[in-house]
Amino acid sequence: MRHLFLTAAIALVALPAHAQKDTTPIALAERGSMVTVQGIVARILDEDTFRLSDDSGDIRVYVGPTYVPADVGEAVTVHGFVDDDLGPREIYARSLTRADGEVVTFDHRY
């Protein structure tokens, strides 16, 4: 029995890094922090900004200066920095992962 427990514990530690990535509910994405959030593209706001929505809420996501690489209704994962300004919360995306596994990275200098 102990052997089975140790084997299971080792298997969990050996999971690929992407399987261990923690996600944050959008409502809990704190200003001034790096986060990974998952949701549905609810609306394209302009060529480089969209609104991402999950069960907890929604948030603006900036991917500029490139065009939004996803469509309305698409499930995506976004990793980035939550702006610490006093205005509406917004994530400056560092990467976006589409449902098919394609990863789009953004080269931001902030």
Image: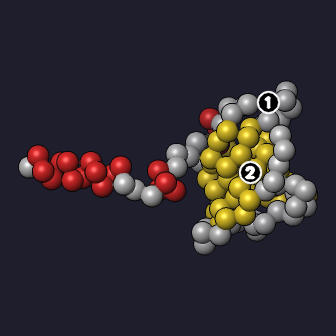
> Residue 65: horizontal and vertical position, in percent?
90, 56
Report, in whole angstroms, how far the alpha carbon at label 2 lies from the one at label 1.
16 Å
Task: Classify 10 Å Cα crowding around label 1: few (below 14), some (14-19), many (20 and above).
Answer: some
Q: Amino acid at mark 2?
A: Arg
Quadrant of the rendered structure where residue 89 is? top right
Question: Viewed as shown, does residue 105 lie left or right of 56?
Answer: right
> Can the viewer see residue 45?
no
Query: How is the rendered protein coloured?
Result: secondary structure
As drawn, the label of residue 94 is 2
Q: Are marks 2 and 1 in contact (CB under 8 Å)?
A: no
Quadrant of the rendered structure where residue 24 is? top right
> Residue 68: horizontal and vertical position, in percent?
82, 62
Q: Which comes before the other along the chain, label 2 or label 1?
A: 1
User: Which residue, given by chain and number where applicable, does mark 1 sit on?
Assistant: 84
> Residue 103: horizontal and vertical position, in percent?
67, 65
> Residue 50: horizontal and vertical position, in percent?
81, 55
> In this rendering, which labeled residue sits more in front, label 2 or label 1?
2
Residue drawn at x 79%, y 36% is 83
Q: Amino acid at mark 1?
A: Asp
**SS class, disc 2:** strand
Quadrant of the rendered structure where residue 56 is? top right
Residue drawn at x 67%, y 39% is 34
Instruction: Between residue 51 and residue 37, name the one nearer to us.
Output: 37
What is the number of callouts on the image? 2
